[in-house]
Image: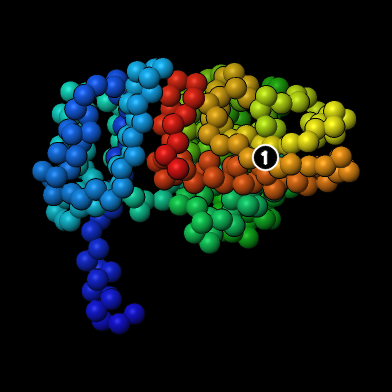
Amino acid sequence: MNEQSSRGAASRPDQYVLILSCPDKQGIVHAVSSYLFMTGCNIEDSQQFGDHDTGLFFMRVHFSAEAPVTVEKLRASFAAIGDSFQMDWQIHRAEERMRVVLMVSKFGHCLNDLLFRARIGALPVEIAAVVSNHTDFAELVGSYDIPFHHIPVTKDTKADAEARVLEIVRENDVELVVLARYMQVLSDDLCKQLSGRIINIHHSFLPSFKGAKPYHQAHARGVKLIGATAHYVTADLDEGPIIEQEVERVGHDVTPDQLVAIGRDVECQALARAVKWHAERRILLNGRRTVVFA
């Protein structure tokens, strides 16, 4: 990098993201844009959506600001606008990598995919730890120099195991938990404590074939389209707000094992996009649905 380009990179304004939802009414966009103008900020990108069914308004603004503006000052000065419009809002530094915990059982394709994407910078996350009820992937996780926590789960130890998961989340200042094929049903209490902060990948294009061996069930029914669904976790099993779905068309000659292999790739793609969008503050909850500013 030459001296001139080095000076240009050093003087690049700080980048921020504002996300908000509130009852829809006139003046929201004007109030937000006026605030940013008055505080010396520049809008880089803005997306908004008004839902006529729920009467709610959603907005994501990526903006830049020169020092001495800080995220703390922005939050403090925006609070009055947030209150006046009854907003649920957040402001974050855009360059900030979200800290996440991955949870996995005995299927490691999604875990391996997320670890690699995070390492090469394709995901704006910092993986603080990996939790598993088995030890199968301890060596893989260790190769990334990431802490691995083996927490066995039985009917009698489930409450203690979930309490330990929450400890890991709190101790590591984690914002998002990702169930990368973690094959345990979470308690209602844990779902509530991590509401809007825990994503699961379901190995079907919901609604789905339920129970064991879904791809074999799909093969028996002669399906022509298989898929995967990334969604937020709620107390209602596999019925949380859907973030992303991916599908793949298959022919009559595809075997159950080939369906499984195709399904693994589809699961990785859907989950990676969901994690990326959440980490970039692109998802807003809209009741049982999501607004995704992708």
Q: Quadrant of residue 87?
A: top left
Of residues 222 and 239, the one nearer the viewer is 222
Residue placed at 57% from the left, 46% from the top? 272
The residue singled out by tag 1 in the image is 247
Up the image or down, 270 lies above or below 195; here it is below
Residue placed at 41% from the left, 51% from the top? 97
Residue 1 seen: yes
Up the image or down, 158 lies above or below 95; here it is above
Q: Residue furthest bottom?
A: 2
**With 54 as the anchor, is 207 left or right in this view?**
right
Of residues 25 and 141, the one nearer the viewer is 25
Which amino acid is tagged 1? Val
**With 83 as the anchor, is 136 left or right in this view?**
right
Residue placed at 74% from the left, 36% from the top? 225
Q: Quadrant of the C terminus?
A: top left
Q: Quadrant of residue 279?
A: top left
Residue placed at 10% from the left, 43% from the top? 38
Residue 57: x %, y % from top left: 32, 26
